[in-house]
Image (cartoon, helix red, strand yellow):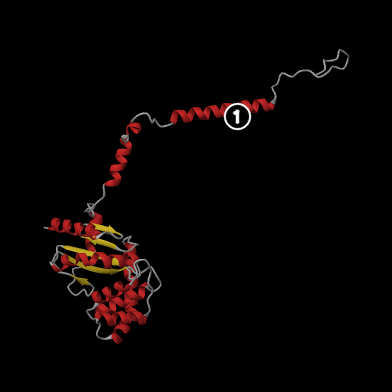
Amino acid sequence: MTSPTSGTEPGPRPTSRSNPVIVFLLICIAILLAVIAIILVLRPDHSGAANTGEPSAAAATASAQVTVEQTSAPSQTDADLLQVMHAEVTRNSDDARAKGDVDAPVVMVVYSDFACPYCTLFAQEVEPQLEDLVQDGTLRVEWRDLAQITETSPLAAQAGIAAGNQGKFWEFHDAVYAAADPTDHPEYTEDSLVAFAEQAGVPDLEQFRADMTDAGTVQAVEDAKQHAYDLNITGTPFFIINDAYVSGYASADYMRNTILEQAAAAK
């Protein structure tokens, strides 16, 4: 480096400002140190319970919450909700799509769709394990259509009504669900539904076909869907069981426990 000249033209003078690159590096280092300090402060302490194999209090609470599961549906207490739920029970002795004693202490209203996989699973695995409660007078089951999953769901619901007109709804119900795949959404045709009706023992298949496609039957299925929507029931299966409700599929033990608890409360 050369010295400043002593002539009339002054040479370069040293500046009092720092080199911008150095300033930038210092700022980056300061930020990095600050981040490291924050990490050290917030780092969990592994010197205590974790090293001894004992969970912290928070972890123990979370674990307890995970392992505690309801074994039945709780009774509702809201008066307005209970009024709506109770209004869904008809106890109509002429209801062709109901089974069980009309005076049974427990009524289970079932909202279902013949194309619903979980409805199929319920019909195949759970309903048979509840049949003894129907037979001994504890449980009455009332069917409601919520036909919405596939384009042919309404047609299948109409077929259910047509089978009920000849006293064969539950036989038809069993035949349809027995043939359904609980991992799929079955599609139906008039002919396939007539075949199920024949399997179910519906005596007059011509009348069955006529009732299935009747305008009044079509409207009844549509009205049932809209009624469910008005109640904010938008999925299947859905169950009202006296003062309790179950949204979605539930195990046989869960459903049985709920029914028996409601029966005890009704005494």
- 230 versus 10 height, above or below: below
Q: Is residue 158 left or right of residue 99?
A: right
Instruction: Identify the amino acid type marked 1.
Output: Cys
Provide the secondary structure element on which disc 1 rests. Answer: helix
Q: Quadrant of the C terminus?
A: bottom left
Extreme residue in the front direction: 52
Image point (14%, 55%), residue name = 265
Q: Is residue 112 left or right of residue 102?
A: right
Q: Quadrant of the N terminus?
A: top right
Q: Position of residue 114 (x, y in %)?
A: 33, 71
Q: Position of residue 15 (x, y in %)?
A: 74, 19
Image point (30%, 42%), residue name = 63
- 25 versus 135 height, above or below: above
Q: Position of residue 39 (x, y in %)?
A: 47, 31
**Mark 1 highlights which residue?**
28
How many numbered discs? 1
Image point (38%, 69%), residue name = 185
- Residue 180 falls in which quadrant of the image? bottom left
- Residue 136 falls in which quadrant of the image? bottom left
In front: 264, or 92? 264
Q: Position of residue 77 (x, y in %)?
A: 22, 52
